[in-house]
């Protein structure tokens, strides 16, 4: 693991702890710093997964959807898929929208494949 990745992972862990303390703005700042380091793909996926989860925590679903759209085409791992599953499950429940249900079902199936 490169020094850049190690620093990025430290910031990602700090963001997770800040999220647990409901210090969402600070958690997002830590994720921004991690992203600025231009880490490897695994760390970058973790940044996006954590950011999506934070935006769901605070009800900023539109921003979470934008993040999912901007990154999901580049790569998905289990952590990101779980964050996106939560995003679309909450949106499908709140709105009943068919598009959200389709995305939820996609991520549910994807998680099932990765978890098998």
Image: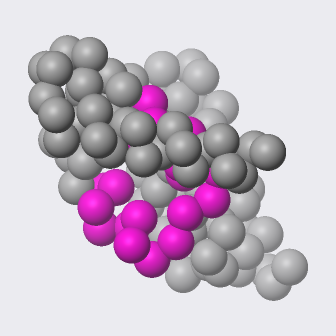
Q: Position of residue 113 (x, y in %)?
A: 68, 50
- Image: magenta residue range: 67-86
**Quarter of the image where one finds residue 8:** bottom right
Q: Which residue is drawn at 62% across and 76% down?
A: 41
Task: Reply above or below: 42 against 63.
Answer: below
Q: Nearer the viewer, residue 27 or 58?
A: 58
Q: Residue at x 79, y 45 (%)?
A: 116
Q: Residue at x 26, y 16 (%)?
A: 93
Which secondary structure class fits the magenta region best?
helix
Q: Is residue 56 left or right of residue 12?
A: left
Q: In this view, does 69 lie to the left or right of 72?
A: left
Q: Where is residue 79 in the image (x, y as percent from the top left)?
A: 63, 48
Q: Give the colour scheme of this rendering.
A: one colour
Residue 31 visible at all: no
Residue 116 visible at all: yes
Task: Reply above or below: 27 against 29.
Answer: above
Residue 89 included in the magenta stretch of the image? no
Q: Position of residue 115 (x, y in %)?
A: 75, 44
Locate the N terminus by quadrant.
bottom right
Q: Nearer the viewer, residue 44 or 9?
A: 44
Q: In this view, does 109 lie to the left or right of 102?
A: right
Q: Nearer the viewer, residue 34 or 111?
A: 111
**Quarter of the image where one finds residue 99:** top left
Q: Position of residue 63 (x, y in %)?
A: 21, 46
């Amino acid at each position: 693991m490169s020094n850049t990745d190690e620093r990025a992972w430290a910031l990602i862990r700090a963001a997770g702890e800040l999220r647990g303390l409901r210090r969402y703005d600070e958690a997002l700042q830590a994720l921004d710093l991690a992203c600025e380091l231009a880490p490897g793909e695994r760390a970058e996926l973790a940044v996006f997964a954590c950011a999506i989860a934070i935006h769901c925590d605070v009800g900023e679903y539109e921003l979470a959807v934008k993040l999912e759209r901007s990154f999901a085409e580049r790569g998905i791992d289990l952590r990101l898929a779980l964050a996106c599953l939560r995003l679309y499950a909450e949106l499908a429940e709140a709105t009943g929208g068919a598009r959200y249900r389709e995305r939820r079902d996609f991520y549910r199936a994807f998680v099932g494949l990765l978890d098998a």
